[in-house]
Each structure stands twice: as structure tokens, then as C-alpha cells.
Amino acid sequence: MNPVVERAATAGAAWRATPAQERARVLADVADALLAHADELWPVADAETHLGEVRLRGEIARTASQFRLFADVLRDGGHVEAVIDHADPRATPPRPDVRRMNHPVGVVAVFSASNFPFAFSVAGGDTVSALAAGCPVVVKAHEGHPRTSDLTAAVVRRALPDPDLLGLVHGFDTGAPLVQHPLVRAVGFTGSEAGGRAIQKLIDERPDPIPFYGELGSVNPVVVLPSADPSTVAAGFAASLTLGVGQFCTNPGLLFVPGEPGEPLGGGRYERAIGAAVAATTGGVMLTTRIRDGYLRGIERLVERAGTGEGVTVLANGASGTGQDAVAPRVFAADLEAFTEGLPELAEECFGPAAIVVKYQDPSDLPAVLRRLPGSLTATIHATDPEEARDLLEVLDRLAGRLIWNGWPTGVAVCWAMHHGGPWPSSTAPAHTSVGAASIRRWLAPVAYQDWPAVLLPQELRDDNPLGVPRRVDGHLHG
Amino acid sequence: MNPVVERAATAGAAWRATPAQERARVLADVADALLAHADELWPVADAETHLGEVRLRGEIARTASQFRLFADVLRDGGHVEAVIDHADPRATPPRPDVRRMNHPVGVVAVFSASNFPFAFSVAGGDTVSALAAGCPVVVKAHEGHPRTSDLTAAVVRRALPDPDLLGLVHGFDTGAPLVQHPLVRAVGFTGSEAGGRAIQKLIDERPDPIPFYGELGSVNPVVVLPSADPSTVAAGFAASLTLGVGQFCTNPGLLFVPGEPGEPLGGGRYERAIGAAVAATTGGVMLTTRIRDGYLRGIERLVERAGTGEGVTVLANGASGTGQDAVAPRVFAADLEAFTEGLPELAEECFGPAAIVVKYQDPSDLPAVLRRLPGSLTATIHATDPEEARDLLEVLDRLAGRLIWNGWPTGVAVCWAMHHGGPWPSSTAPAHTSVGAASIRRWLAPVAYQDWPAVLLPQELRDDNPLGVPRRVDGHLHG
């Protein structure tokens, strides 16, 4: 453990001093290397995750594109957030010359996710954003795909100027020492709420607690309003729910649909269409036996509640796939009252292809129930009349970090505007994102230079702006 | 407690919906109100803090100027960090339209500081940045100046559109319920490391832990290099050390000076000049008896260590002021070896006019010792030859959030470029600042809108940009 972190820190000194343009070139090289090794990478990952060639090749391409986005981010230079306030000797008190920019924080520890063996793992979003920031990375491999982790690390390391910039450790026991290592300056984590709380506790025990960026779960509510186009909802929902055997942080776990007075639970127009669509789906083999067991426990809880006959029922089961850890998609129906009474338990994430379809009679009842949901990465509206959603806006933008219109939450575009975060438990640091250009900010910290000699200033803060980075100068932003 | 938070949350709904330009006008009104009531405010604060008319009038002006800066921030609009990525149907996979901007997080709890009864208290930097962000605030008053807190709150409330936007609670017992209130969405704190750890524990116990922005102490090392101008160091140091009876978070607690081989501890050129300058100073009455007791305990520890005769000695004492809680400035001398052996204890902040002057023989020994110091808000270099400092740069920008050249750390300019933060314990969230324009970011969280109808988008994200805010559109920043 210690030697891996120490070697990363040592390698980090030169990486930190490497100009952003050169770091960009390295990131582009890593993207090329990942694509060049796709033929070797995907079969190893498939053997460990059962995700299949198409998905895994797509994920390798996505992982490479994340490296390319951060190469663009570095070429742009806006990530250093350069700000210059020239001295104002006439101010009271006289104002010194103050210039600020972001610097890399140091070694970043990354706990990789189970469900994206490439895009949120050894070469995933946390790693690439940290490398882009100028930070060396030590990844705690996910136990679900150790060989994929090793192979990916080998591919990435060959494209880095110093292989020690990407450390890799295996095994549950390596996690705590990594979080508490004196040279580790920030932690990225994707996993369970219990895991996230355990890491925060380890951080609190440090002599110098460090920032923690965790993504701990999300139920991703979808609200179908009365004006929605019914022809697209059921099929779209079933497809989003079962994609990747439901093993996405953005899986839609709650669907609110309008119902008619007096119709039976499960017997409404949306419920019948959704039931039919989900019954026609087939599940598959989950990532690990542990994840399958967690899914089955979650389903068990919901089946028990449905068994009480109090406003909750089984709506539909898909077919199970074949294989040892195969599971079937499961959808439940609840009326709004029963769902509300079942909170917070009924809004707990059940990781996998499971959801609750909640039927409401009156859209004006929705804000109160949405307000009681835990924070999510996403919230989605289906409607053809935007005005129907206006009263929900204030609730939605405090419920989730990404609001989707007439779409589905699975699929996260890797772009400048993306936000992948939200209130707890979807993120432990809701001001930050773990996907997209802004995710680099987690691994940067500002330094202000006061009356600092020009010859010692970073290039980004010199008056002549030799790198042409965007800056705010004396209050005015120059793109 | 609960009613105060709930009323703040209720008032927050309208405030959040108030256009930024209008919030700017309100902030400017508060600035005017504070200045208009300066004649009433300062005597109340003086009776509670003994800081005197000149300082307190200056601090009221500073507090008003903080409101004016945030009015400018709101008029600029850059704080929402608007980003637009238009849809790209040709991308693989096709990219939706994604637009992101920051929104207020909700009720902010502020624990005010002892040492700035205006600028870091009820109407201080945390409060104004949160109000600017669109967040209501509930302040836990500092027990050192309760009447000042009440009077300030009354002045500010009259200038707000709804007085409930600024709640105020008193008493130690109100702290924990405030941190754990379900409607509180973030906490700002200025105080001790023990206090900060206690708040983090309370946050960890929440069903939904929230962000914590704490400033917990700073020792603010100053390094005098061989090329420094000796004529300015001693007087400048003594003035900075004793300003406000040393009760500043940026008080210079460690001064590294060059010495000659063989000269006795305390007998070098810098030590003698500093000893004489500090001996000529007079202390004063500290803010509270508790703060005085803490200072005396810190001094006691250092005197004991000096008594052992092992490379640490008393260098000089200033005169005590008059009054019950008056204390004298105290400066100690240590050689580099003894100081290094005494770490980490010798680098603990002793809040008040106390410092250790550490004598080194060889500047190349400095990086190793600076690397062992705790994180600070500031680090300062005195030198006439910038090249002398080059080898320290890499250490300095990980040691402190603000680097000062040939100046002194007390005095924090309130401007766009300021950064007031740093590694633990100077900040619990080193990516964020508690002074200057960027401090608003602590109370904002992004929301991304995916394929969202134009009619429901916030104005800042509409294609026509009616408010003219700075934005990044399809990767290009427009100031």
C-alpha cells in the first residue's frame, strides 16, 4: 500500500509541473491506447462482468472519449479559473495585487465502481479527471473485475510519462489505509451509502481530514404527467429499466403515472402497458453474486410489502436470463397513499432492474411526495405540455442534479454541461459532479498570489497571458 | 430553533425566485443600512469586544463593502456558471441538449466568529455570500457579542424584503439542533479544530449529511530569505503580530529568519531587531475571558518548553494592556532543529499575539520543515531576489491558500481573486474560499437540464441569454 502511494506522489511532482498542453497530449495518447487494446480488454471484462461485447466495446469507446474531453479541457485552460485583480492603491484600505488559480491537490484515491469496468473504474471518470488536474491516482480495484483492472492499468501506464502516476491496489483491506494515507489528498468513491459513511468515518479519524467525493445511490424518479404521450412511456421505461440488467446509478427506480378514479391498482392504462412491456423483457446475469444477493433482498422486501395487500402489488416480472447470477426484472405498483406511507423505505434504491410504478390521481399531490424523496442524480418529466410541469420545478431542482424532459435517465452524456451529482445520497458533495468537464474541479484547489513577483507567477497569471487561458481580470471575464 | 429555521426556509422560497439583479439591489440596501447605523453599532460592539472605535468603524465599512461586492457578483451573473451544450445527433451515442447552471442550496447555517463582530458575524462573509446565492441564513450568534449580533440582525432585517431571511439563535445548546435540522442544507463555521470536528460528527449523524465549510485555525508561516530587506521585517512583523491583540486567523505565528553560524539563539540580527520591536508593543484586552485563557495556556506550553533550554527560548515580551482580560504579546526564539523536533506541537496555533521566530542557517533546509507544517490560510515570503524563493514554490502552494510577497498576512482584501482557505485545518473544504467573490460557490449546487423545454428553462440558460450572463456554449467561454 504505502509504496504505491509514495511512488505515485513522487511521480506526481513532475506531472504537476508538466504544462497543461503536454498533459493534454498524454491524455489523448491514453485514449488511443485504450481503443487500440479494445480487442484484448473487452473479453477479459466480459468474463468478469457478463456485460457482453457490444456494451463493453461501447464502454471502452466512452472511456477513451472521456480522456479526449479532458484533453480539450486542458487545452482550453478554463479549469484553472484564473482571476486577476490588479492593485488599487486608492481603495480603503489600499488593495494589493491579487491573482488566483487552481492547482492540483496531490495524490487522489479512487474507489472504482462495480458496474462500469472501464468508464468508472481504473481508467474511469475519477481517474481521468484527476490526471487531467495534474494529480497522480491510486485506484482501489473493484473486487468484481480484478483482471480487467490489472489489464487496464497496464494499458494506461504504458501511455503515461511515468507508470507510477497510476497506482492500483486490490483487496478489501487496502481501502482503509489508502483513505488514511498522509499523502492522499482527496477520495473519489462510487458505491453504497454504508460504504460511503465508512469512508467518511475513516477520513474524520485522520489528523487532517480531506475532501470526500462519493456517489452513494440514486432512485431516479420519473414523473409521467397527464399530457404525456402514452405510446412512448411503457417501452421507453422497460428499456431503461432493464439496460445492463438495471445496474446503473441512473436506473429509473420510481415511475409516477396518472390514474383514473376508481380503477384498480395495477389496472390503469399506464400500469397495463408497463406491465406488458416489462413482462416481455429478459433479465440477465448480474455483475457479482453479492450484487445479485442484494437485488434479491430488495425484491424480497417489496414482495413482502405487496403481500400485505395494502396499496402495493406486484405489477409484472420479466424473464430471468440464464446463468448462475441471473435475475429477472421486477416491477411493483403502488398507489400514492401507500407509497407515501411506505417512505422512506419504498424510496430506497434496489440496485438492479426493479422499480415501483406509483399511481396518482391529482398532479397537485406530486410536489409533497417528491419533496419527501431522497436526493437523486436525475429526475425526469414526461409531458407534452410544459406548463403542466411548472409547479414541480422548485421541487425538482432540489431533488436531483439532472432534470430530463421526455427521455430516460440511463445514458449520461460526457460533455461540458453535464452534472452528475445531487443531494445526499446521490452525492456526498452536491456542489460537484463526477461526470463531465467540471468533474476536474474536485481535484483542484485555489491558490491566491498577493503582490507576487511576475517571474515567479504561473504562466496563467502573468499579465501577457502567454497560454491564452480564459480569465477574469479586474472583475471582467474574458473567454 | 425549529421555528427560526422553518421561517427562514419559507422566506427562502420567494428569495430564491427573486431575480439576481433584484437581489443585488437588496444587498446594496443592506450595505447602506449598515453604514447608516454605524454610530449605533460600534459602541455596542466595543462594549462586548474592546476592539475600539477605529477598528470597529473600519470593520463595519468592510462588512458593507462585502455586500457591495456581492451585488456586483450578482449583476455579473458569472456565479451561476451557465454552460450550454447543444444537441449533437451525429455523436455516438447521439448527444442530447444539456444546459447547466447553479442554484441556491437552501437554508444555510452560519456559526459566527469571535474576532470579527461584523465582518465574520451576523452580517459577515458567510451570511452575505449565502444571501447573494439566494439562500436564507440562520446564524448561531457568537457568545462573545450577543447584543451586537441582535442589533446587526435588526439592521439587516429591515433592509431585507422578508426579515425571516436572516434568522438568529443564541446559546451553545442551539448549535447541534441547527446543524441537524432537516431543512438546513449547508454549514459555515469559523472556530476551533475541536469545534469543527464536533460539527462534522453531528453532520455525519444526519440521515442526509450536508456540506461543511469550516475554517479551523492557521499558523501563517512567514519566511524571511537571505536577500530580504532587514529594515522592514521587524517593524512589519511586530505590527502584524499585535494588530487586534493578535486575534486574527491570519496572524503570523511562525517567522523563519536567517542566522549566522555560531551566533547564540536569540542573538542574531533579525532576532534582536524583532525582540526590540515586540518589546516596544503593548497588548490589550482580548475578546473574551475564554479566549484569554486559551492564549495563556498556549503561552504556558511554550514557556515550559523554553525552560528546558533545548533550542527554544523566550525572545521578547510586549507590555500588557490594562483591563481584566488584557494580555501581552509574547515572542519565542527557536533554532530550526529544536523547532523541527517540537513538531507538530510547536506549529499549533496559539490564538493571540504570540509567535515563534525560527532561525535557520541554510535556506535549503526550509522545504523539508515547511512540508511538515499544517495547512495554513497564508504563507509569506520576504526577499528582494525572487530566484531565492523558486525552490520553495512547490511546497508553498500546497501549504497555504494565499501566498504573500514582502507583505504581512493580516488584512484580507475582499475582491474577485481572493482565496481564503487552504489545507486542513485552515479549511475543511480546501477547494472553497470563505472570503471574496468565489465564496458564493459554497451555497450553490449545479442542476443540468436535458432536452428541457425553452419555456421552462431559467433565463440564464435560454438561447437568447436575456440577462447577458457569461456562459460556456458548446465548449467556448463567452465573457
Image (spheres, coloured by chain):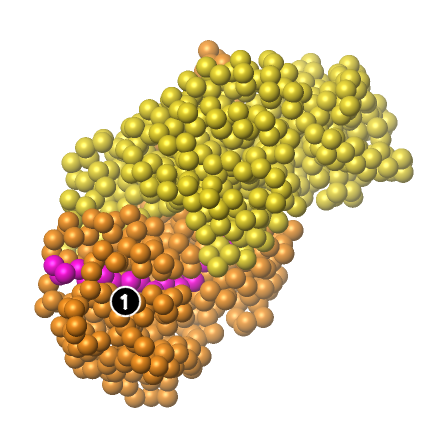
Chain colours: A orange, B yellow
Name of the residue lying farthest toward the front: A262
The three-letter amino acid code for the residue at tag 1 is Leu
Confirm whether residue B81 shows in the render.
yes
Q: Is residue A373 left or right of residue A107?
A: left
Measuring 16% from the left and 36% from the top, which residue is drawn there?
B464
Q: Is residue B403 above or below residue B452?
A: above
Q: Nearer the viewer, residue B82 or B155?
A: B155
Q: Is residue B125 above or below residue A296?
A: above
How far across and how far down the image is residue B477, in percent?
A: 27, 37
Q: Nearer the viewer, residue A352 or A391?
A: A391
Span shown in magenta: A212-228
Q: Is residue A69 above or below residue B163?
A: below
A64 inside magenta stretch:
no
Q: Is residue A326 left or right of residue B435?
A: left
Confirm whether residue A415 shows in the render.
no
- So how many labels did they put on this image? 1
Measuring 22% from the left and 65% from the top, which residue is drawn there?
A360
- In the figure, residue A368 lies in which quadrant? bottom left
Q: Is residue A71 left or right of residue B30?
A: left
Q: Is residue A324 above or below residue A245?
A: below
Quadrant placement of the C terminus of chain B: top left
How far across and how far down the image is residue B323, in percent?
A: 77, 20
Label 1 residue SS: helix
The residue carrying mark 1 is A336
Answer few, some or many: residues within 10 Å of disc 1's Cα (few below 14, many 20 plus, some between 14 and 19). Answer: many
Q: Chain of mark 1?
A: A
How far across and how far down the image is residue A233, in percent?
A: 16, 67
